[in-house]
Every structure is written in C-alpha cells, then in structure tokens.
Amino acid sequence: MSNLLYRLGRSAATRPWVAIGVWVALALVVITSSVAFGRDLEESFEAPGLDSHQAAELLAEAQADEGGVTAHVVLEAPDAAAQLAPVETALEALPRVLSTASSVSPEGEVALVRVQYPAIEDLDATDLDNLKDAVADLREESSLTLETGGDLFFAFEEAPTGLGEVAGLVVAMIVLLIAFGSFVAMGLPIGMALFGLVVGVTSMKLVTYLTDIPAWAPQLAAMVGLGVGIDYALFLVTRHREHLALGMSVPEAAGRALATAGQAVIFAGGTVVVAILGLLVAEIPFVTGGGVAISAMVLVMVLASVTLLPALLGLAGQRINGRRRRADGSEHRPSTGWYRWGAHVTRNATAYLVAGAVFMIALAAPVLALNLGFPDDGTKPESRTERRAYDLIAEGFGPGANGPLVIAVDISRDASVVTPLAEAVAADPGITSVGEPIIDVAAGVATLVAQPTTSPQDEATQETVARLRSEVFPAVLDGTGLDDSAATAHVGGQTATFADLGDRVQERMPRFVAAVLLLSFLLLTVLFRSVLVPLKAVAMNLLSVGAAYGVLVMVFQWGWAAGLIGVESTVPIVSFIPLFMFAILFGLSMDYEVFLLSRVREQYRRHGDNTRAVIEGIAGTGRTITAAALIMVAVFSGFVLGSDPVVKMMGVGLATAIFLDATLIRMVLVPATMKLLGDANWWLPGWLDRLLPELDAESIEESQEESLAKPVEVPAAAAVSHSPSSS
C-alpha cells in the first residue's frame, strides 16, 4: 500500500492541475445530480417492531388524524374562551391543516388549540413557516399573548445559527497558523476540508437511493467531516514539511508523506467508517441512515486527503514553509519538550498508569446512572416560544397535556372492547383523562387519546406506558397477542415513541459495542501486526468514550455546571446519542492512536528499542496531535453554544472525549502502558503473521534510509536517558 500511495502522492504533486480538475468536475457532477435527481431527506424517527410503530401503522391505515403531526397554539387572557374563535378560524385556513380542537383551562385563563396536520411525509418546513406567520398576524391584530409548540416544531424548526460554528472554524485557523507559522500551510487543510464538505453534504440527496437519510444527518456529518478533514490534512502537511526540511523535492516530499502518514489516514478513516457503520447492528432505520451519511462524509475526506491535498501541496511548492523557513530545518525536528515528557512518563510508567486509569474510571462511573429519554420543550430556554407554550399548557391543563398518549386499537376482530378499554385506561393511576373514542368501523381501528398525570420526560410516564401495555391492555383484551381472535392495542404518540427508542437502544447497545470493538481490533491488527497494541487501543478508547458518557450524565442529568453552557434544567440523555457518540468517538479516538503508534512502530522497526521508540513517537507527534485535538475541540465546542439541548449534548460529549483522548489517554496512559509491556507490544503469533497481508513497502523506507532515519536531535540539556535499563 505504501508504494501505491507514494506513486499517487508524487503524481498528484507533479501534475496538480489534473487532480484539482478531476475534483472540480466531480463536485460539479455531484451538485448538478443532487439538484436534478436527489431525493428528499427523511424526517421520521420510526423504528419498525416497536409497539409505538405498530400504533402509527394502524393509525396510518385508518388515515386517522391522530396519526399525523400536531402543533399547539396557546392563548393566555383573562377570558381566554372569548378570544378563541378568530384564532381557530385563522389556523383552520392554513394549507394542509386537517382540523383543530380547542380546550380551556378550568380557571379560564389559558386556552389550547391543537392543530392537526397529516403525516410528516406530506409536510415540509413551509408548513411551520405558515403557522408562524399566522400566529404573528394574530398577535398584531389583537395584541393577544400567543405561544406555539408541538411536533411540527420538533420536525422542522432549525436551531438558530449562532457564532459557535464560525468561532470553531476561526479557532481552527488560529491553531493551524501557530502550528505551521505559514498562511499557505494553514490554508491548505481548511480549503481541502471545506471543499470536501461541499461535495459530502450535496451528495446526501444521492445517497438516499441506497438508504433513507434523516434530515438532521447532514449537520452531524458536517461537524464530523470538518473535524476529520482538517485533522487528516494537518498530519499530512506536517509530514510533508518534515520531508522538505530534509532537502527533498516537493513531489518527493508529497509522495513520502502520503506513503507514511497517508497510510495512517486511510486506516484512521477506515476505522471511523467501520465504527460508524457499526450502527447497522442497532437495526433502527434513522440511526442507520445517520451512520451512512457520516460514513460517506468521512470517506470523501479520506479521498480528498490522499488525492486533492497532494495536488495542493505540489501547487504550493516551497511557499508552504512561509518566508522565515530556517535553513537547517530545525523547526520541523521533534519537540524537545515532548521528548522530555515522553522520557518522564516512561520512567514513572506504573504511577502514571494507575493514576490516569483511576481518574478516567471515576469520570466514567456516572454512566451507571444514565437515563435515556428525550428532552421535551420544557428543557428549552425561556426565550423560545416552545418553552413558553409548554409552561402555559402545564400550568393550565397539567404536565401530561404536553405529551398525550395515542392508543390505537385494532377492532377488526372485536369492536366491543373499545368502551371497557377506555374505562380501564382512565382508571389507571398514571392517567388523568381519556378523550371520547374515535371509531373507524371500515378501517377496523379505534383511537383513544389519554393524558398522563406526569410530563413527557418524567420516568413515571414511561412506567405508565409500560403498565398499560403489560397489565391494562391484557386484562381487558383477554390475552392480547395469544388469541388470534382478540383485539389488540398499541400505545403511540411522540412520548411513547421516544420511550420505545430508548428501550431499543439499551437492548441493542451491547451487540453494537461488541461489533465495533471486534472490527476495530481486526483493522488495527492488520495495520500494526500486533495483538497487544490493538487490545490496548480498544481498552483506551473505551475509557475515553466512557468518560464522555459520564460527563454527559453529570452535566445534563445532574445539572453540574449546566448553567455555564446555557442549560436551564436537567434533561435525560437523548436515546440515540449514546449510539452515535460511541461510533463517532471510537472512530475519532482511533485517529490519534493510529497516528501516534504509526510513528512509534516506524522508530521501533529502525532500532528495535521499544522504550526509545515510544519516546520518539511522542516527540514526533505530540505537537501535531495536540494541534489536531485543539481543532476538534474547537469545532465541537461551537455546537455547545447553540440553544438546542440535543446539539449541546453532542458538542459537550465529543469535545470532552477528544480533549481527554489527546491529553490523558494518548500522552500519558498509552506511553505508560507501552513502556510496561515492552517488546511484547509487537508480539504476533507466527501463524497469524503468515495470514495477515503485508502493508508496509520496505523498498520505500530502505531506499533513502539515511534521510528518513535521522535520529531525534535534542540539545544536551534536553537529553534524557531512555534505554530499557534506565527508563
């Protein structure tokens, strides 16, 4: 593989306009095809097989209004009932509105209008815009206090675009400028990543021909893609400049950068893709679609790194080093500070390993209290109309009014059960009221709308849903699911759907984690031709992911320092976030593992001294990994500044894990562990050695061994004994 990458990098750098032209043509084809033939992205959060999904299917078959999307318009006035008529009239006149239903609180000061829309597949963002415009006109005409919320907002409301994302990109530019000391060197990773971002995002509508892609996936894919794209380019540009400092020509330096760091990029990107595609095991369609979208973005970034970037390096020539390039190339030598640090850690390996592991386990411990659910509108800032509507509904009608349960009953075999079932549901201690049954004899479906006594995200609401399914329904329906002649009932609605998704995630999580760990281990075994190094990598990455989960629990469930990031109340962890976070973080953590260990292995193969190789690996990559991590943390932290708790969770979790991974894991626990394992790091059974493909091209390394194998030069004051006996 190294030989192939060497030829690819040298060719692209020698004829840069050819590679750039191919990428421009590809971008034009993708953009044009997406506009002309692309399919719309999905807004659904369905998961086949769940009880709530069965309810949705029954309602859809009956074309029941309750199976569609709802919106809430809440009116507050001393005599709210008297103000209802013009509001309902205006809302009923909106396009695609099926019906409206109003109610007034017992005190008469709060009125609620539920606006019923068809299924989400028949709607788009213009429906939300029409609702907002109608409410704004009503406010102006009557000076009424009107607030809005509901499923329609959840489906189509986009979080306000703040300065967070832009700030993350600016910080990335500053870090690159400091790391490289050259505007050209800084601009290449940013330019390549942004170009890849355009191609990746616009391709999403074409990927839908393979699988449904959720509408929120491009934003998450862009966040990950921007981070990995800049990181991959950073590592390649760093290697390229090191080779230029050794006196190589620009094409030769680009070829060798791709042959060494490029191979690490391919395997790092491959590990990210494998980890994310592990989401297929979850068997949740929208989760799978999101994973495919992110994987497609990462693949685009890997391809751009090994084809487009070498062309840009060839085009930049010697200007990539800036005006103040030192003649002796000393600015590209391994850092003496990192050299000292590596020697210090290996001398005190046991102490650092124990202390670091205890700290990481302590951070991960709160994961035992992880509570999966979905933040409702009550968790949004009070500046949002959805939050104000939520509070008014809870105040006027009770907290459960914000999350009604929609019960679909299949009465095609027995229609006599509707009344006793409605009475039994109303008698449940977790239900405050049940609406009049809506019976569609032709479709064989009856619909009950029940209001819980507790809020949508309250654990007691989930217990109520479980009790209805396991106790109330069987008691009335006489053996539901066992007797083919009996009626069946299913609990649906957004509250039940998200509770079911949480249960599905917890059920599938062990299988998903096992699949990702196994595939990642196999990939790293092939790359490093070792058994213990991949095992160590898997264990370390589990620590960083576990710590990220623990921090999420502390911040969002327990409220520790939540106010600092604009979270006004405790919230459960969104059900699908642990899946996505594990896949993304495990893959990204492997990036740094691959880049560090690739350098360690290179050094070990040259002189066979494990401890020295570990120190030299840290000295050669410490500065670059730190810069890469700062960029990732900056990009992910930008999302913490948003107003959506879901986006905040992703930002906090990803930024925390990357920070810990690039500092405590990569620069403390990894070298300490590798020092203690010694030469056993590189042990591989003979039978396995014969089975694994050989990826290293010895001819490349040996052809200019003298230039590539220069020893790490450190001043006498920085020299530290690192022989196996002394360290």
Image (spheres, helix red, strand yellow):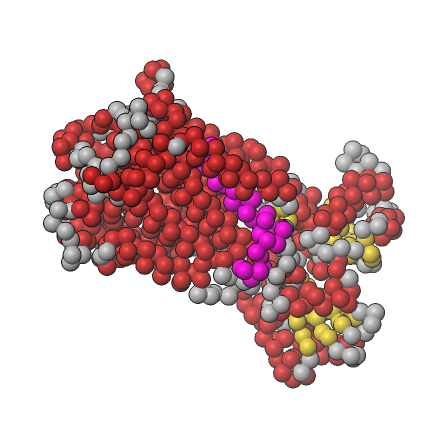
From where the camera sits, is residue 308 visible? yes
Left or right: 158 in relation to 530: right
Q: Give the mark count.
A: 0
Q: Can residue 271 be seen in the rendering of this structure?
A: no
User: Is 679 situated above or below 379?
Assistant: above
Image quadrant in which you'd find residue 201: bottom left
User: What residue is rendered at 34% in x and 15% in y?
Assistant: 686
Helix, strand or loop: magenta stretch: helix
Nearest the camera: 80 or 25? 80
Q: Residue 98: x, y in percent?
A: 68, 65
Residue 497 x, y percent position in the rendering: 66, 49
The residue lying at 76 percent from left, 36 percent from top is 481
Residue 178 location, x and y as percent? 28, 56
Indicate whether residue 563 is drawn in magenta.
yes
Left or right: where 115 falls relative to 654: right
Looking at this view, name the residue that lies furthest to the top. 687
Magenta residues span: 539-567
135 part of magenta stretch: no
At 35% from the left and 56% from the top, the residue drawn is 172
- In this view, the residue in front, 549 or 623, is 623
